[in-house]
Image: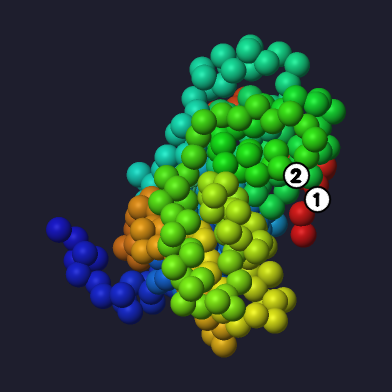
Amino acid sequence: MSLDAFLDDEELISRIGELRKKRNAVILAHSYERPEIQDIADYVGDSLELSRLAARTDADVIVFCSVHFMAETAKILSPQKIVLLPAAEAGCPLADMITPTQLEAEKEKHPGAGVVAYVNCSAEIKAMADVCCTTANAVQVVEAMPQDDILFVPDQYLGRWVQTQTKKNIILWAGCCPTHQRMKVKDILDLKKEYPAAVVVVHPESNGDICDQADAILSTSQMLRYCQASPASTFIIGTEMGMLHRLRRAMPEKTFLQPSKGLICPNMKMTQLEDVYESLKELRHPIEIPEPIRLKALKALDVMLAAVPTK
Ligand code: SF4
């Protein structure tokens, strides 16, 4: 066993800092990552926010503390950079709920439909889509499509929410995020009884019954801005528990409550300080995407960015 296995957190954080400089690296962490990973990151945000940051940075190495499809998105946008996924096995069950073969068959069933792929999918699926979208811009992307029929993959709940906001005909794919599906209406109602003035904010990957209880349905980056701008002091946050750390850090004077203790994405919690250290030390787990797939996936992302420029 290597002596590195006995390093305590303080020593790991110090070595990560040294390696970050030596490698000219930037460390990015999704809002659902463990608190100690968010705390050492240069930037914390949602997947597209971070990928766009990764494309703009002059760092040579991007350590993307997240799950596979997110690091892939960074590589699609920044092919010349080394993009590392510290926990190689961190995947996303939602992204795995559609394969290229399944999407091909679905496209054949709906030949006139435009294909919109939520960014929570593999590079292969992005490459087969007309355009990508995020939770923050899904409605605008769908509205900008020339087709009236839209095949929306892979998250059915985000697709259902989009359907409530547009006259287009949304053809849903039956994927879902298992973490958000653990939230129950009763969890929110029980907390509302205890904190009647609390504002309920939920992520659109939640099911419709949950969304019906919400004062606002927002992506993680929108949640941060919404809570900062709101005069309210107490919020019930219906998304993965890592987001509460980000909100509490940004607004220590406000109270953020979690409706259910089960709102944990096991994949987002795989990355530990040791993984970040090892990935920087050994340039471990670089993301590679075949160039023809990367170029097609880039086109779908570019169409989205052209249709809906993000801040
Ligand atoms: Fe995938 Fe859901 Fe985990 Fe996000 S929270 S990575 S959508 S399983």
Secondary structure of residue under mark 2: loop
Which residue is the site of mark 1?
309
Q: How many dots with numbers?
A: 2
Please state if 233 lies on the left or on the right of 39 as rendered.
right
Q: Of 136 and 160, which appears nearest the observer?
A: 160
Q: Which of the 4 image quadrants contains residue 276? A: bottom left
Please state if 54 lies on the left or on the right of 304 as rendered.
left
Display coloring: rainbow
Dot 1 amino acid type: Pro
Q: Is mark 1 within 8 Å of ligand 1?
A: no
Secondary structure of residue under mark 1: loop
| Residue visible at 58% across and 66% down in the picture | 200
Which residue is the site of mark 2?
165
Residue 144 percent across, percent down from the top left: 83, 37
The furthest residue to the front: 193
The furthest residue to the left: 1
The furthest residue to the bottom: 253
Graded by Cα atoms within 10 Å as few (under 14), some (14 to 19) or many (20 or more), the crowding at tag 2 reads few
Quadrant (top left/top right/bottom left/bottom right) for the N terminus? bottom left
Residue 36 percent across, percent down from the top left: 40, 71
| Residue visible at 33% across and 79% down in the picture | 10
Graded by Cα atoms within 10 Å as few (under 14), some (14 to 19) or many (20 or more), the crowding at tag 1 reads few
Residue 105 percent across, percent down from the top left: 56, 14
Dot 2 amino acid type: Gln
Alpha carbon of mark 2 to alpha carbon of mark 1: how far?
20 Å
Please say whether residue 220 is visible from this viewpoint. Answer: no
Q: Earlier in the sequence, mark 2 or mark 1?
A: 2
Whether 296 is drawn above or below 12: the answer is above
Please say whether residue 177 is visible from this viewpoint. Answer: yes
Q: Nearer the viewer, mark 2 or mark 1?
A: 2
| Residue visible at 49% across and 40% down in the picture | 176
Residue 165 percent across, percent down from the top left: 75, 44
